[in-house]
Image: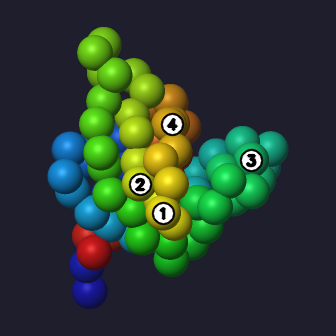
């Protein structure tokens, strides 16, 4: 069994899969509509100069997320 972590703790180049959400329903739904669903693989591409937002490669496109949202996304290593 692999240990769950929070997406906000991942570094550039790390890959993983979404395992769950600890976000309010509206924010969770918005992320799911953008393709970030449970089981979805991702790769952390980069961080903005001040560290927020972070950019992920998800389903063949790049998605920018605020650290506040990333702190509510549970992930496991891929």
For label 1, the crowd category at 10 Å Cα-Cα, with few meaning under 14, some 14 to 19 and many 20 or more, is few
Q: Which residue is mark 2?
A: 57
User: Residue at left 32%, top 66%?
Assistant: 16
Tell me the distance, in whole angstroms, between the alpha carbons under discs 4 and 1.
Answer: 16 Å
Q: Residue at x 41, y 54 (%)?
A: 57
In the rendered structure, which disc, 4 or 1, sits on the residue that comes first in sequence? 1
Q: Is residue 32 above or below residue 2?
A: above
The residue lying at 26 percent from left, 86 percent from top is 1
Q: Which residue is mark 3?
A: 30
**Callout 2 environment at 10 Å: few (<14), some (14 to 19), or many (20+)?**
some
Taking the view exactly as shown, the residue that stands out farthest to the front is 60
57 left or right of 59 in image: left
Query: Which secondary structure lies at badge 2?
Result: strand
Indicate which label's residue lies in the foreground, 1 or 3. Answer: 1
Give the distance between the C-alpha atoms of the residues marked 2 and 4, in whole angstroms: 11 Å
Q: List the residue tagged with mark 1.
A: 60
């Amino acid at each position: 069994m692999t240990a769950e972590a929070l997406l906000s703790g991942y570094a550039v180049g790390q890959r993983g899969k979404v395992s769950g959400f600890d976000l309010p329903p509206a924010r969770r739904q918005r992320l799911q509509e953008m393709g970030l669903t449970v089981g979805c693989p991702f790769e952390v591409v980069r961080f903005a100069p001040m560290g927020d937002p972070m950019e992920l490669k998800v389903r063949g496109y790049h998605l920018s997320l605020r650290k506040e949202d990333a702190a509510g996304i549970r992930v496991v290593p891929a």
